[in-house]
Amino acid sequence: MNCSNAMISPDPPSPIAIHGAPRSGTTWLGQIFNSHPSCAYRYQPLFSYAFKNRIDFNSSEQAAKQFLHDLLHTEDQFVLQTGEASLAQGSPKFEKDPAPQFLAYKEVRYHQLLPHLMSIVPELRLVAIVRDPRDVLRSWRAAPREYAAEWNFASEWDCAPSKNAGQAENFYGYSGWKDSLQIFQRMTENHPERAIIVRYHDLKNVPSETTRHIFNFCGMNFSDQTCDFLRASTTTKGESDPYGVYRNNSDATAHAALDSEIEYAVLTDVKKEQLDFYLDPN
């Protein structure tokens, strides 16, 4: 990988929202942002106890900016993914500049709030990641904290009634994947200069090139630390943690075959909705 030390903008912290359906690669993408020395990274704040219900459809611009200010200065262990609140077994550690110029946070829930949040925070950028829905379903079924062994996958794969539990902020299952993608697409149409969609298989297959594109969109340089993390996270072997960020073989559990009827139903609907672009060609 070719590492570059281009200068970054001296602007004050710029907010970046990383969104994706559950099991779409948001944790890895989040750590790629975290690898940048001048980026403060936060984990699922709207799902945390510390920030739950801080943003809703009635939130004002002032409330949203206060939320971002508090997010930047939080000491909450879940949001920072430190101590006992850390979900991954081996989270990477990065050197940080004393005054971050970017604030990035990731969410796999609350996508329905994006249109309002984008409208009241004009400087907010959205980086949405979309993974092949078949791999999303396989990965979800293999994640013990998110899929209970006693559930019947034939009844769960589409609308995920047991996991979503009728809550609007949850986007599990194939329908959740499609609903979230429709929101992301609408954001790129309404805010083309502030919202992009990244395909997971592009990030995995050409990580350096894809990351450069993402960072350039966000006004960030491609740091040496990011270069090193991408190299490590795509070559390290032995990763078995479903919440880990090392991509060399961590997707192994996701490749267990879907029932042929489920896969057929997914592919049929994807083609009907003209969403083939998001299928992994490999």
Image: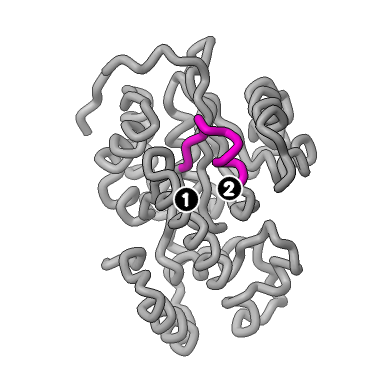
Q: Quadrant of the N terminus?
A: top left
Q: Looking at this view, name the residue that lies furthest to the bottom.
A: 261
Identify the amino acid type marked 2: Leu
Is residue 171 found left or right of 57 in the rendered image?
left
User: Is residue 194 shown above or below 155?
Assistant: above
- The image shows residue 165 at horizontal and vertical percentages of 75, 68
Quarter of the image for residue 85 reads top right
Q: Which residues are magenta?
A: 116-126
Indicate the colouring scheme.
Answer: one colour
| The disc label shown at residue 252, or none | none
Whether residue 89 is visible, yes or no, is no
Q: Which residue is mark 2?
A: 114
17 drawn magenta = no
At 20% across and 29% down in the image, what residue appears?
Answer: 2
Is residue 102 found left or right of 206 in the rendered image?
right
Marks 1,2: beta carbons within 8 A: yes
123 drawn magenta = yes
Q: Earlier in the sequence, mark 1 or mark 2?
A: 2
Q: Which residue is mark 1?
A: 187
Which type of secondary structure does the marked residue at label 1 adopt?
A: helix
At 47% across and 89% down in the image, what residue appears?
Answer: 261
- The image shows residue 76 at horizontal and vertical percentages of 73, 29
